[in-house]
Image: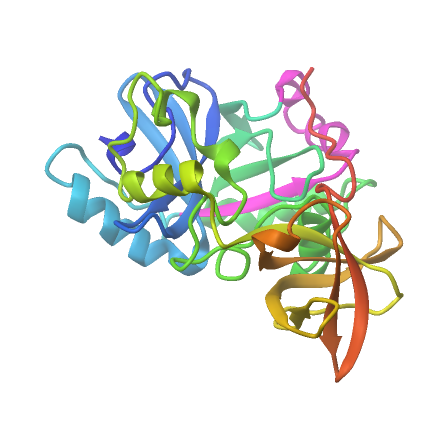
């Protein structure tokens, strides 16, 4: 049932693993990105963006409500992200088994006597875990984690700098219903079995539009951008070519503390999307030179065993 809404291989997803997915609309536009884990042969656990949770639940109920049971855990569970190179060391003091997990593994285990869902994943490019905990126990677990010497609290700004350095899209910024997986450079997230030449080709909303773009190309696409000056280039800045013609827009940008320099992502005309292409951002009326760059800007450090 879920495969009818996402361009991802769910049938072959093993129990105890999760996969990155997207809801698409009839035009191939991205409605949200999400994580899907298989708890059992007939049970999936879906984690969506908080800002999209109500519309995603309605989307599932509208299209799949007659085929399977859909249970919302929005009010009953909280999600804690523990990210960074010392994450395994810190969490394994509370649950030694997590140290043996690898990237994208998903399991149910007890933390401080409470049943939690734990995945070795996160949206930072770092090793780490995402922990689904009953809401009434969330504060106690958070405080227990913060009591570990390696752990500090961070805000969304810090998290955002990491996901940008890792070249990861932020929904509502780098991808929206107006962008398709092809335009967003997310073709890698379309599973082999669901591609035009796959065993279960298409059969997701907008498949024909997505396959046509893969075949014929797109007028613009998402790229990584490295400003050549120490000037942060923020979301919304227009991107121009050497003649000053607007060819795109920055969708995420800021300072990359790990890289030690400004980084950005945005959409540019396909004619300027090749690596090392020179483009310019307009920042407060001044042209800031940028180069189209490969992402991730900082190597991802997922633990694969």
In the figure, is residue 182 to the left or right of 69? right
Looking at the picture, how far across and down is residue 233, in whole percent? 74, 68
| Nearer the observer, 55 or 253 | 253
Residue at 79% across / 60% down in the picture? Answer: 290
| Nearer the observer, 28 or 2 | 28
In the figure, is residue 138 to the left or right of 58? right
Judge whether residue 115 can be spotted in this image.
no
In the figure, is residue 174 to the left or right of 233? left
Residue at 64% across / 50% down in the picture? Answer: 273
Residue at 40% across / 60% down in the picture? Answer: 178
Looking at the picture, how far across and down is residue 228, in whole percent? 86, 61
Judge whether residue 297 can be spotted in this image.
yes
Residue 39 is drawn in which quadrant?
top left
Residue 195 is drawn in which quadrant?
top left
Looking at the picture, how far across and down is residue 110, in whole percent? 52, 27
Q: Quadrant of the N terminus?
A: top left
- Which segment is the magenta one? 77-102
Residue 70 is drawn in which quadrant?
top left
Q: How many marks?
A: 0
Looking at the picture, how far across and down is residue 294, in whole percent? 72, 42
Residue reaching furthest bottom? 285
| Nearer the observer, 214 or 254 | 214
């Amino acid at each position: 049932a879920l495969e009818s809404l996402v361009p991802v291989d769910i049938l072959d997803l093993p129990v105890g693993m999760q996969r990155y997915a997207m809801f698409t609309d009839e035009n191939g536009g991205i409605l949200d990105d999400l994580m899907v884990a298989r708890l059992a042969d007939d049970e999936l656990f879906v984690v969506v963006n908080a800002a999209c949770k109500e519309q995603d639940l309605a989307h599932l109920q509208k299209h799949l409500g007659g085929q399977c049971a859909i249970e919302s855990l929005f009010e009953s569970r909280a999600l804690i992200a523990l990210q960074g190179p010392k994450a395994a060391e810190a969490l394994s003091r509370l649950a030694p088994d997590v140290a043996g997990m690898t990237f994208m593994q998903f399991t149910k285990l007890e933390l401080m006597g409470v049943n939690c869902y734990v995945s070795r994943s996160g949206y930072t490019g770092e090793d780490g875990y995402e922990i689904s905990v009953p809401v009434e126990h969330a504060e106690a677990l958070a405080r227990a984690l913060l009591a570990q010497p390696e752990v500090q609290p961070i805000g969304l700004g810090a998290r955002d700098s990491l996901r940008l350095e890792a070249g990861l899209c932020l929904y509502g910024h780098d991808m929206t219903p107006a962008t398709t997986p092809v335009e967003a450079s997310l073709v890698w997230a379309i599973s082999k079995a669901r591609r035009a030449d796959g065993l279960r080709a298409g059969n997701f909303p907008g498949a024909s539009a997505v396959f046509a773009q893969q075949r014929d190309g797109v007028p613009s696409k998402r790229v990584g951008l490295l400003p050549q000056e120490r000037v942060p280039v923020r979301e919304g800045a227009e991107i121009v070519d050497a003649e000053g013609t607007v060819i795109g827009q920055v969708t995420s940008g800021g300072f990359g503390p790990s890289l030690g320099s400004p980084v950005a992502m945005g959409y540019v005309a396909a004619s300027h999307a090749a690596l090392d292409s020179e483009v310019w951002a307009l920042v407060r009326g001044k042209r800031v030179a940028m180069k189209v760059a490969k992402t991730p800007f900082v190597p991802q450090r997922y633990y694969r065993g």
